[in-house]
Image (cartoon, rainbow, N blue to C red):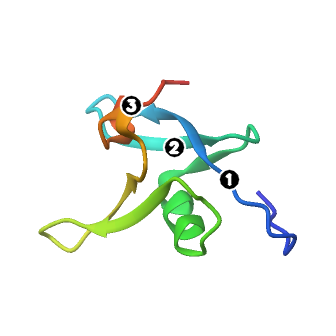
Amino acid sequence: MKYTDDGTKYKIVAVRKYNDGSIESVKLDNGNVLAIGRAIRVTKEGLITNASIEMDDDGKEFIKPVNSAQQEGKFENYPIF
């Protein structure tokens, strides 16, 4: 996915999961699909507006939705693609 400096921001609208239920990749509102590692980096760059980055107890980064009461604060509850 190529990003420009035009100020465009994106939203995560769906997720793809591994068999264990963890998130493999996310789908953005523009239709592009990002592997979870890339989604974390893009979120850190401020280009995904409905997510934030947090760390678990082991120091591993994970992506978490913001302002998403309908999904109960978990991307695991988002639509599957």
> Could you tell me the amino acid type at mark 2?
Ser
User: Badge 2 local density, few (<14 within 10 Å), some, or many (20+)?
Assistant: some
**Tag 1, which secondary structure?**
loop
Residue 31, placed above or below residue 39: above
Gap in Å between the C-alphas at discs 2 and 3? 20 Å
Identify residue type, mark 1: Tyr
**Residue 77: percent from left, percent from top:** 35, 30
Direction top: furthest residue: 80
From the viewer's side, name the closer residue of 78 and 38: 78
**SS at circle 3:** helix
Residue 22, position as x, y percentages in the image: 31, 40
Circle 3: residue type = Gln
Q: Mark 1 sits on what residue?
A: 10
Q: Which residue is mark 2?
A: 25
Name the quarter where the N terminus is drawn: bottom right
Residue at (49% x, 24% y) in the render: 80
Helix, strand or loop status at disc 2: strand
**Callout 1 touching callout 3 (CB < 8 Å):** no
